[in-house]
Amino acid sequence: MTRQEVFAWVKQQYGTDPDYPWADDNAVLRHKSNNKWYGLIMEVGRGKLGLTGEGTVEALNVKCDPQMVGALRTRQGYHPAYHMNKDKWITVRLDGSVPEDEIENLIDLSYRLTETVRKHGKTV
């Protein structure tokens, strides 16, 4: 799944358009209702993910069930979350190493894990 395919899928599923809060191509996927992030698509240096070679890779950070994080990180295409809480987020390479349906399922999980809204100190 590519960056553009992720954007098309989240637009269809959740009505989300990518948000570019920085002066680069890194894009945040946010809930419309609470502005919380449920995804971050970025270019990351290969070495920062423990990969060999020069250059960068496209990657997606998603919030994940902490019980799943450890098992996923042992699989091809998954890494400890880059610049996020490594217990609750995971980085997924967008280079074909992870099947499209797995990426879609993880995005959906992240969306659900981040959709609660706090009002007046209460989760609703």
Image (tube, grey):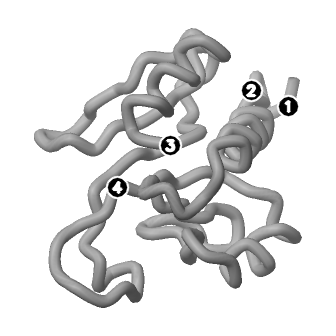
**Mark toward the viewer: 3 or 4:** 3
Residue furthest left in the image: 23
Q: CA distance from mark 1 to mark 2?
A: 6 Å
Question: Element under label 3?
Answer: loop
Q: What is the quadrant of residue 59 in the picture?
A: bottom left
Residue 114 at least partly seen: no
Label 1 to label 3, Cα distance in Å?
34 Å
Q: Are marks 1 and 4 in contact (CB under 8 Å)?
A: no
Which residue shows up at 63% across the image and 62% down it?
Answer: 89
Across and down, in percent, residue 75 comes to 68, 77
Mark 3 or 4, nearer chain start: 3
Residue hosting label 2: 117
For the point 76% across and 42% down, which residue is it? 105
Q: Residues within 10 Å of mark 4 (few under 14, many from 20)?
A: some
Q: Is residue 44 left or right of residue 79?
A: left
Asked which quadrant contains residue 46, the reply is: bottom left
- Where residue 22 appears, as percent x and y from the top left, is 20, 40
How far is mark 1 from mark 4, CA to CA? Answer: 34 Å
Q: Position of residue 30 (x, y in %)?
A: 52, 28
Callouts 1 and 2 close, C-beta under 8 Å: yes
The tag on residue 58 is 4
Above or below, 104 against 68 in this view is above
- Characterize the local packing of mark 1: few (<14), some (14-19) or many (20 or more) Cα atoms within 10 angstroms: few
Is 28 situated above or below 53? above
**Left or right position of 68 against 44:** right
Disc 3 packing (10 Å; few <14; some 14–19; many ≥20):
some
The answer to which of marks 2 and 3 sits earlier in the sequence is 3
Residue 1's mark? Answer: 3
* Label 3 to label 4: alpha-carbon separation: 10 Å
